Image: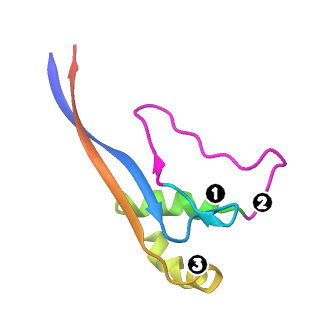
Amino acid sequence: MKVRRYTLLKNISCDAFIKNGELRKPIVFKPGLNVIIGGSQGDNSIGKSTFLMIIDFVFGDNDYPIKEAIVIKNIGNHIIKYEFFSQWLLLY
């Protein structure tokens, strides 16, 4: 039996996450598979790729800061907040 500690993303919020003209509530993640999808009409340009870049950024990738100039040009300066939680798992 082994004990392992996993660090998981709990939530992300940003003052630039807008839904229907209003600030979106924090996006909450659960253990397991979390899916990011567009609208029912197959919408493009709604931020899926940018959101995935932000997730990469909070886990330590540097792609978002490199492309930040493009993002700031499109949406302006913004603050990204994120929270992690740790979980201990017993592996048999």
Residue assigned mark 2? 44
Residue assigned mark 3? 71
Q: Is residue 29 shown in magenta? A: yes
Taking the spot 81% from the left edge, 49% from the top edge, the residue there is 42
Tell me the kind of residue under disc 2: Asn
Query: Label 3 crowding class (10 Å Cα cut-off): few <14, some 14-19, many 20+?
Result: some
Q: Which residues are magenta?
A: 26-45
Closer-to-camera residue (31/17): 17
> How much space separates mark 3 and mark 2, taking CA atoms?
16 Å
* Prevailing secondary structure of the magenta residues: loop
Marks 3/2 in contact by CB < 8 Å: the verdict is: no
Taking the spot 43% from the left edge, 74% from the top edge, the residue there is 79
Q: Quadrant of residue 44?
A: bottom right
Query: Label 2 crowding class (10 Å Cα cut-off): few <14, some 14-19, many 20+?
Result: few
* Residue 91 higher or lower than 63, as above or below: above
Of the numbered discs 3 and 2, the one sitting upstream in the chain is: 2
Query: Label 1 crowding class (10 Å Cα cut-off): few <14, some 14-19, many 20+?
Result: some
Q: Quadrant of residue 56?
A: bottom left
Taking the spot 44% from the left edge, 31% from the top edge, the residue there is 32
Q: Quadrant of the N terminus?
A: top left
* Residue 47 higher or lower than 33, as above or below: below
Q: Quadrant of residue 86?
A: top left
Residue assigned mark 1? 48
